[in-house]
Amino acid sequence: MERFDVAVIGGGPAGMAAALAAREKGATVALLERDDRLGGILNQCIHNGFGLHYFGEELTGPEYAKRFRDKVLADAGITVFLEAMVLSLTEDRVVTALSPTKGLVEIEAGAVVLAMGCRERSAGAIALAGTRPAGIYTAGMAQRLCNVEGYLVGKEVVILGSGDIGLIMARRMTSEGAKVKLVAEIMPFSSGLKRNIVQCLNDYDIPLRYSTTVTRVTGKNRLTGVYVAPVGEGLRPDLSREEYIPCDTLLLSVGLIPENDLLTGSRVEMSRVTSGAVVDEYRQTSVPGIFSAGNVLHVHDLVDNVSEEARIAGAAAADYAQGALSAGETLSVTAADGVRYALPQRVHAGEGTVRLYFRVDKVYRGRTVVVTSGGEVIKRKKTLVMAPGEMQYIEVDRALFKGDVSVRTEE
Amino acid sequence: MEKYDVIVIGGGVVGTAVLRSLSAYKAKVLLLEKSSDVASGASRANSGIVHAGYDAEPGTKKAYFNVKGAATFPSLTRELHVPYKMTGSLVAAREGGLPALEELKRRADLNGVKAEILPAEKVRALEPNISREILYALYAPEAGVVSPYKLTIAQADHAVVNGAEIRLEEKVVALSKRGDEFFVRTDRGEYAASYVVNAAGAGAAEVNGLIGEEAPVETHAVGDYYILDSTAAGIVNTVVFPLPDEKGKGILVAPTADGNVILGPTSRKVPHDEAERCEVTPEGLALVREGVLRLIPSVDLRKVIRVYAGTRTAVGGDFIIEESTRFPRYFMLLGICSPGLTSAPAIGEYVAGEAAASLGLEKKQSMLPLPHKFRLSEASAEEIRGKVLSDPSFGRIVCRCEKVTEGEILAAIRSPLPARTVDAVKRRVRAGMGRCQGGFCRPRVMEILSRELGVPLSEIRLGDAGSEIAPYEVKQNYGKI
């Protein structure tokens, strides 16, 4: 059994930022990564647009990852385990991992930061009707095949869902000579970033149809086409207006799910809305000493926010391991009136400010965000536009907390 | 032209069962399969139920082979290392359903199958999540669940270990008999045989047509299924059926042998070509949801990880298991629909016995066993430590959801019947069968296949010819980042 102050599970942007933040507090850190290199999904995101907030400059995914990786690898206080898949985590923070070089590794940690990221929703999860040919991929799988392996999955493409990876892949496949015939989005709005719709679709004249879904796929061995139809009430497709689009590729960009399989059967309280853990402002879960950050906690749209959040979790995990994280009563943070969720879901009263991150449930223009505590309004902020695809935050003074907190919008 | 004692046409669970039983004899035997892997038709996508045998009408071949087959499963699956659980089954009835259960109970008694009618409270003791409207159920304790494709693959592997040959991607296009000899022509070659077994499943009538034997009228049906994530396991403990109707045994809820939950199937009559396409329909899925909610109202459909359709072929009411009178030593297996999976091992034994008697084949003293393969998900900590020490590839997890290592994938590719496609790997080791459905591991499985088979990644297929997954190189190959 090896012993570290902090064990960080996952070596993507969240894990690396958490590990570095824990080191700044003097903690010894084990960083466990299942792939053969650090960086996570950033390694396959060769487009730019990363780091505008965090570094104030525009980087590609691999460049953004490298900034952290170089620091991590240069720090003797961080022990990096590569190709190490964590198989189990106990409540008293014993982490068991498997790696080809070390076999079964057991680590006893003073605190644990969960940073496993997320996975894409699959064709099975959306119960796609029709045949089961080759030619159907999650957008991220096609991205990996294209950017890491060097192979293109097809030439005539329909994309279901307007998540960011799908939008990025629309541009990427176009640049490789493929024809993207349509992006169909079942909702009346996109879950992707506005800038991606402009730069990846509009700039390439790729049509995006809202309130439209794929109803069926055809083709025995290889996809030969898809049927699309507009959806009406309850998102039910109007089959009388079904249209056939011949294509050899269907990319799915229909949502991301925090990869919390490790917590199955644990006592960590989970949110049904985010599919991540319920945390306080330190990103500590309901099980003391277990922290969560990045896409495993809730799906982010910007990696910059992931890094920010993971720094909070990493620093707090180091404090916890060193007995310096003050516990105390928490207040609950809930969402209402147009706010789908707010995070953290619990806060401590005290000094300084805390940022409450939240997502809205549809596109809002000219709404005011209102934070109440103990029934009294403690903050108001007028906004121009808020979209579900773009995470919002509001900063509040902790001294104003008098009771449970609510984040909502009003006209 | 290569000459065989016996050629089996069709690599489903029945064909491979025949082949495996034949490999117990001193004989040169060959199986021809048109797809890129065995278990590519009805054996690939069915409910995976080992039926106890109360349903089949007494005196039929279905009843005989079902009961005989079911009895072999505990030892057969142990010998072949195939996931199997004797879960028991319930046929759940609502108000007014008692007479139908009594009829099933009568059949059970005549077929020699253990079964009893339970009152509501005993049903609930077995299945706490069952609908409050269920008032009785027929309980058959010896029913079970098995992985149908893993059984098929293991039978094929075991046959190959014992000297049988299997040729994949060879479709029989001509079949004739001259004198005592059969000539089997495929799209790739021609073979001679003294005995031919037609186990071509949905294509069996077509094969009959090739030789000039009567081709009975087949009916094809397609059924939709849902698979739920392993975290849904426990919602049912047994196989829960509704009362059977004219369409079949109805929409069931069952644990799978691999630890998921299966819901389905529907039964939609279709023409032959549509059966081959095996399309999932939204209407079918709606019927499954409806049927399932009537049995287990609390089932969580957010845990769906896969939907698919399976096909089955029937010929009249009973199995056709007989030697041709017009063409002696041409043995026909037609309409092996439910309970075909359960019956397969017994059918295999029977047909091999018939062929052996006809040809005067001698039985081998013993069969070589099918070696057990390491499975990380089933291994103890000590076994894992030892295995990884001797071969690090067993410490490299490729499929995160199902915890499948590179070593297991390599072993599948180097199996007696080698996996050549992504789907073939998936069916052998479950890489890509978990909740992300290959989102992460598929490119890695492709890499491993590409490396092992010595072909570029662009040639790696999902399944049959034409199913290449990433067929084009990017214009500018940036190489590994």
Image (cartoon, coloured by chain):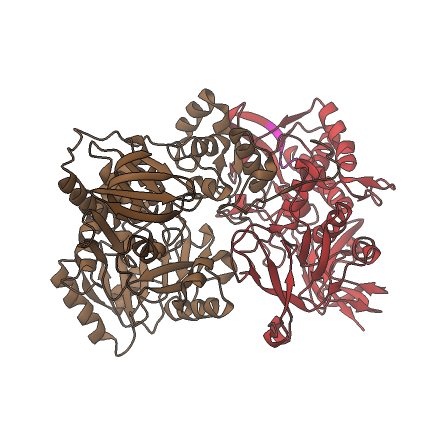
Chain colours: A red, B brown
Which quarter of the rendered picture does the C terminus of chain B lie within?
A: top right
Does A407 sit above or below residue B393?
below
Residue A287, image quadrant: top right
Residue B411, image quadrant: top left
- Is B185 displayed left or right of A249 in the figure? left
Between B460 and B46, the one lying in front of the other is B460
Between A71 and A91, the one lying in front of the other is A71
Between B436 and B265, the one lying in front of the other is B265
x 19%, y 29%: residue: B366
Task: Indicate the position of residue A313 as horizontal and vertical percent values.
Answer: 69, 41
Which residue is farthest bottom? B96
Does B243 sit above or below residue B379?
below
Task: Indicate the position of residue B452 as horizontal and vertical percent values.
Answer: 52, 29
Is any part of residue A314 visible from this angle? no
Between A245 and A123, the one lying in front of the other is A245
Is any part of residue A87 visible from this angle? yes
Task: Indicate the position of residue B193 as horizontal and vertical percent values.
Answer: 26, 39
Task: Indicate the position of residue A295 as horizontal and vertical percent values.
Answer: 67, 47
- Is B205 displayed left or right of A181 in the figure? left
Prevailing secondary structure of the magenta residues: strand
Which quarter of the rendered picture does the N terminus of chain B lie within?
A: top left
Does B337 sit above or below residue B464?
below
x 81%, y 73%: residue: A411
B336 in magenta: no
Does B134 sit above or below residue B3?
below
A9 in magenta: yes
Task: State the extent of the magenta-drawn residues as a range.
Answer: A4-11
